[in-house]
Image (tube, grey):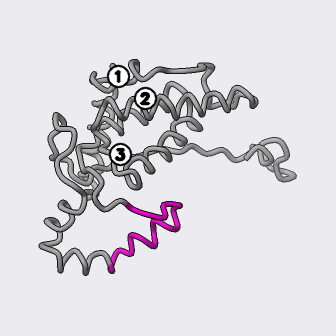
Amino acid sequence: MAEVLSNPLPGAAHPLSFSVLRVPFFLEPDYDENKTHIETNRERLIKKWGGKRGWEVQKKRHDLKGRGMNAGIPHFNLDRLASNTMASHRLIQYVGKRFGLRVSEGLYDRLNVYYFVEGHSLNDKPLLAKVAAEEINKLLSVSETTTNKNDEKDETSIDANEILTFLNGDEGRSEISMALRALNDLGVHG
């Protein structure tokens, strides 16, 4: 992108620009937000597909392992803890607003490993806050050694307690809820 902006095609009136919009998606929107987790993903999928046989058929049809490999996730933890994901969606949105796209996308990548590989619940707020603070601070320390990009904010750190306070509040909830209603109106659901 830097090359396109600094050296656009001859005759191009304006360099091309783009934005990334992360759209929240809840596989199980009715999971209780007050519970750290509800069940394992294995239990959830066996119930969803009508038993073990239905689950086996669905695994082959979706090729989740192959798609995971393509996305850089070599091993899915089938017994990961399934939970309501409002907290993690709000967190990604908050980090994007506060620290910019590079940091929020870096955190998003880390949370994919946290959930899909390590098997942690996305609604375990103390653990989520700890892991998020570690990753955000790592990403911010890398940005201190590089030139500040347009989408990055000039903040140097955040602590887990600040993130936990955010997660225990309601900031960002209405935006995530509105996005979910819009997706539902379009027929997009789990």
- Percent position of residue 115, x then y: 37, 49
Q: CA distance from mark 3 to mark 1?
A: 18 Å
Percent position of residue 61, x then y: 32, 79
Per the image, is 8 magenta? no
Q: Position of residue 139 (x, y in %)?
A: 60, 33
Residue drawn at the location 56% of the way across and 28% of the way down: 137
Q: Could you tell me how far apart the alpha carbons at marks 2 and 1 are, in whole angstroms?
A: 9 Å
Which marked residue is nearer to the observer: mark 2 or mark 1?
Answer: 1
Q: Position of residue 73 (x, y in %)?
A: 48, 60
Amino acid of disc 2: Tyr
The label on residue 94 is 2
Q: Which residue is mark 1?
A: 166
Q: SS for tag 2?
A: helix
Q: Nearer the viewer, mark 3 or mark 1?
A: 1
Marks 2 and 3, the one that precedes in the sequence: 3
- Residue 103 versus residue 180 in the image, above or below: above
For label 1, the crowd category at 10 Å Cα-Cα, with few meaning under 14, some 14 to 19 and many 20 or more, is some
The quarter of the displayed image where residue 138 is located: top right
Marks 2 and 1 in Cβ contact (< 8 Å):
yes
Amino acid type at circle 1 is Phe
Say which quarter of the image contains residue 157.
top right
**The magenta stretch spans which residues?**
60-76
- 122 horizontally vs 11: left or right: left
